[in-house]
Amino acid sequence: MMRQSQPNRRSGDSGVALILVLLSLLVLTTLAAAMVFSARSETLASYNYRIGTQAEYVALAGVQKALNFFNSSRYVPLSPPNAALGTYYTVSTYANTPVNLYFTTGSPVTCTSNCTHSGSVKLFTSAGASAYPPASVTLDGGGTQVDVVANWTAAMNNQAISDGIGGGGNYTVTASLLEYHTVNNAFFGVPAAGCPDSSAGVGICRQPFEVWQVRSTGTWNSNLGAGAARPTVEVVATISPIFLPYYGFGLYGLCSVAMSGTQVCTDSYNSTYGQYGASATGCVTTTTGATNAQFANSGVGSNGGITLNGNVKVGGDVTYANTSSDPSCNTGFSGSTTGIAGSVLTGPPIPQPPSIDMTAWGYPVSTPKVEPPSGGTGNPDRVINIRTKVSTPPTPPAGATFAAGGGACPAGFSAYIESYRHNYSGGVNTYSNYSCVGVLGSGTSTAPYLVGDVAAGGGGGTPGSVNLIGPSGSMAAPIYMAINSIAIGQNGIINTSSVAPSYPAATDNTFTPNSPAPTAATATPFVLNIKNDLSIVGGTANMNYNASTPGVPSPAYMTVNIQGTGTALSLKGQAQLNGMINVPNGDATLGGSGSSGAFFGAILAQNVTDGGNYPVHYDLALQKVSGQMFQAQILSVTRPKM
């Protein structure tokens, strides 16, 4: 029986299985190694991220400590009077309304002399590396010297910090002064209680506004692996206070703003550079050009809401805060954005401006009443002169006839109210119905000149003129008046000037009932505190307005604080007003101006309504007149690559 033979295997197949097994083992080993490496890498990355984050938190703690330092009694900036000397920092004047305000040239700020070291102003980790004004000129409110450099070194050099569970690190912080300028941290016209400024009595409290750049280096020292380097992170932060100007908008409502109608608009100019550069009866519509009039930087704002309807044009941003606690105030923005040159945005609320308690002066009062005399023949000029800050009583015009019960001015006062009628008839000047009374007060913020109701105009014929007269001078020395109310009717005029109307020779037909228009150099600053309301209604009725130089002098030379409620400010008809208006408890209404009405300055009121062809020309110089500064804050933080 024959055996069936097996087929022979080819010699080339030998060992294939072994190779496959080995390859499989290699792949599995590689995968396992990769998994181990990945896990190890992730562990190391997580570790590095953790200790790096801990080091960053330590550095951020240093930034917070720097912020606390700048807001503490251990730090005192260079005072404005010392800055103004130019002995320590090189400064220039950037504003002169209401007083000179200064800023340093260049960034970072350089200490030119008398600092601990010359060069850039800085606070470093040692006194030898720092450059800052000496303790002899950095005094606290009690007059005690504060050694800022020593305080900084003690507080910011290699300071330890703990996480509370056994870990910790160290931070070191240095600071460089990028910007220094002074601001008026007060409400001009209202005494700034507790302020050491020599002009605090008139609402001037100059304080330094500083921008610091701080570099904080944080190191984490705990739970490090064997041989591991200490992780170090540097962060850079900008620290600065916040300054909110009270008059940073053309119109601002503490409750709301509503604008509607045709040719209702805002634009801006800067009285520092002269008069408004276009027609006062409308607004410009361009944002560029050589004239002192721009369709920019003249925004409107509100602590509540803003409504724009119709063909309204706003030459700037529309800003609302939505923070009013009064449920009657609207919120947000409504209406058309077509005429807005800027953006619609939210912003911080303006603080409530101060009210003035006029009851301390006996208000409301009714006397002395100020009103040009009525009657007379031949359509006479009807004139009131309120002469302030005089050393002797005014002399009546030659040949004047006295009103019944009237006579020469009494002695013993520093302000007088003259009233008379003037006629030019038959080639001769005559003055009739002359009277003169003394005014109580001294014209200061605590003892203003006290008068009752003031009225001018209201009828046809020759306008009635009220001239507020006082010596020209700095806004740091304004003349204060307390008034029950002001009503300017048709053709009525209230002027301010340093010069009274002159009495021409008997046959000289050049008499004018109005004081010479003031210039920026000859303006007299007045602060009018009004108990009830201010109303300017009627054809060509105006107050502190010069048609030949609109917007000049600065509206800040006529500061008006109206304490009434309801509609406390009313501008209608063709009313013209140049002033800085504060209505903390009441509303402002503008409208129906006709062809020549205009407002120059800024208005701050509870509710502002502007409707019916009434242009508002905002003076950019008012941004610096009044404001409130808040504590330093961290504005930005970055972590540069190391």
Image (cartoon, rainbow, N blue to C red):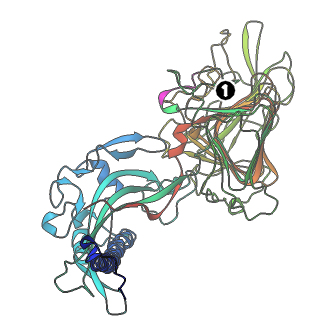
Label 1 neighbour load within 10 Å: few <14, some 14-19, many 20+: many
Q: Nearer the viewer, residue 299 or 374?
A: 299
* Region rendered in magenta: 273-277
**Residue holding disc 1:** 283
Q: Is residue 533 visible?
A: yes
Q: Nearer the viewer, residue 497 or 234?
A: 234
> Could you say whether the residue bearing mark 1 is in a helix, strand or loop?
loop
Looking at the image, residue 361 lies above or below residue 546: below
Residue name at image x 87 percent, y 22 percent: 460
Q: Position of residue 320 (x, y in %)?
A: 67, 52
Q: Main secondary structure of the magenta part?
A: loop
Outermost residue to the top: 427
Q: Position of residue 252 (x, y in %)?
A: 67, 47
Q: Say left or right for 351 vs 91.
A: right
Would residue 525 be counted in the magenta stretch? no
Q: Nearer the viewer, residue 299 or 15?
A: 15
User: Where's the C terminus, which quadrant?
Assistant: bottom left
Amino acid carrying mark 1 in the image: Cys
Q: Position of residue 42 (x, y in %)?
A: 35, 76
Q: Say left or right for 604 vs 214.
A: right
Residue 463: image quadrant is: top right
Q: Nearer the viewer, residue 159 or 380?
A: 159
Q: How many marks?
A: 1
User: Where's the N terminus, which quadrant?
Assistant: bottom left
Residue 16: image quadrant is: bottom left
Q: Position of residue 26 (x, y in %)?
A: 28, 77
Looking at the image, residue 210 lies above or below residue 4: above
Outermost residue to the bottom: 166
Q: Is residue 453 visible?
A: no
